[in-house]
Amino acid sequence: MHKLYGWLRGAGIEPNVETLPKHLKVIDEYLPEPDEIISFARLFYGFGSQADKSFDKFGTSLQDADPSFLMQDHRQELAVFAGATLIALIERDQYEQLSELAALCLVCGAAQGVRTAIPVPDMAKIAARYIENRTGKRALRPVGAVEEDNEPRLGKLERELALVSEETNMLWWLVSEYSRDRNRSWKEVGLLPAAIIAGKELADLTRVIPGPVAAAAFLDRIVRVPASAKSPKSIAIMTAVDKTPREWREQYTFNATASLEDLAPISKAIRLSLTVSQGDDWSPVFEKGTALAASSEMPPNALAYQIFMEGLMLRLSGEVESI
């Protein structure tokens, strides 16, 4: 039996054994465009609406297969279908950038396990495993504008140089124990700001998405530098954001559409924190827009990894091309 049956039951929906095989065929074969990937992830996490025009093509495909299926009557079921379509794209693994965008959207939306109201938690875990697997295969994919079919040797050389350059820059960054953005040691930066700034800096240093295999280990090492025996095991999102210098937040690059912003809660928190002169008056807007409490806590290394993932997702969304 296909795992979609179990996913639906886990979301509190009893599968229709007569119509589900028709839906499953659509899900397994559907190839979403980049904007659809973002919309599917938003719907999965409860932000989107089935009335979104991005679902028109997908909804038509479902209704062609099953005329009795009306999107407006099956929101929860459609949310599971949207997530399942992204998982099918990931597991098909034929369209690298689209698959990686789907995986990053699912991983970022889960917010390192802080988000609990998820129809099918297993989908975010599958996406995380895919990213982990893709990091080990980065040397096999092209970099830049060189076309592999036309110049395979040049493409391979460009790829190798990009990875060597990335690795060298990251190693210097680790060894120096110095923040590039703040131009001071991580000890001077402090633990709470470092948990956010370090993730952004590692994303800046990443040349080939989805980043190096040791990304999580790199960030864990960085946040240990300013930590002490009295440092908290977990820190609140709101507190960590407010502890970052305002001038740094003002320079934080956030070139995301409103729809993509929903899947990047820490980046959204950074932007919203600039809407007030001081204090935490932005937190109610954050909570309403992300369905996360501003007081939600993450371990420092997890917070750093979350902002790292968000940086890659935001960048890839601007680079990915339709198939």
Image (cartoon, rainbow, N blue to C red):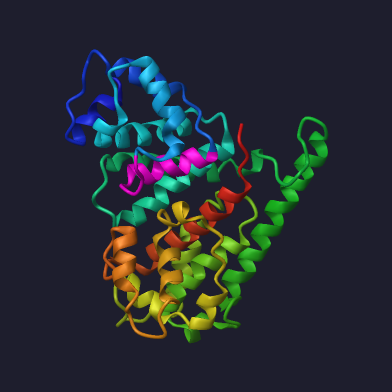
- Is residue 153 found left or right of 204 in the rendered image? right
Q: Is residue 284 magenta?
A: no
The quarter in which the C terminus is drawn is top right
Residue at 29% across / 22% down in the picture? 69
Q: In the image shown, does 171 or 182 lie closer to the viewer?
A: 182
Residue at 36% across / 45% down in the picture? 48
Question: Magenta stretch: dominant SS?
Answer: helix
Within the image, what quadrant is residue 306 found in? bottom left
- Is residue 209 found left or right of 267 in the rendered image? right
- Is residue 18 found left or right of 29 in the rendered image? left
Relative height, residue 295 to residue 96 (above, below): below
Q: Is residue 45 magenta?
A: yes
Relative height, residue 323 to residue 172 (above, below): above
Relative height, residue 182 to residue 128 (above, below): below
Relative height, residue 272 to residue 226 (above, below): above
- Which span of residues is magenta-colored? 34-49
Which percent across, then down, holds residue 265? 39, 61
Q: Is residue 298 visible to us here?
A: no
Residue at 43% across / 58% down in the picture? 264
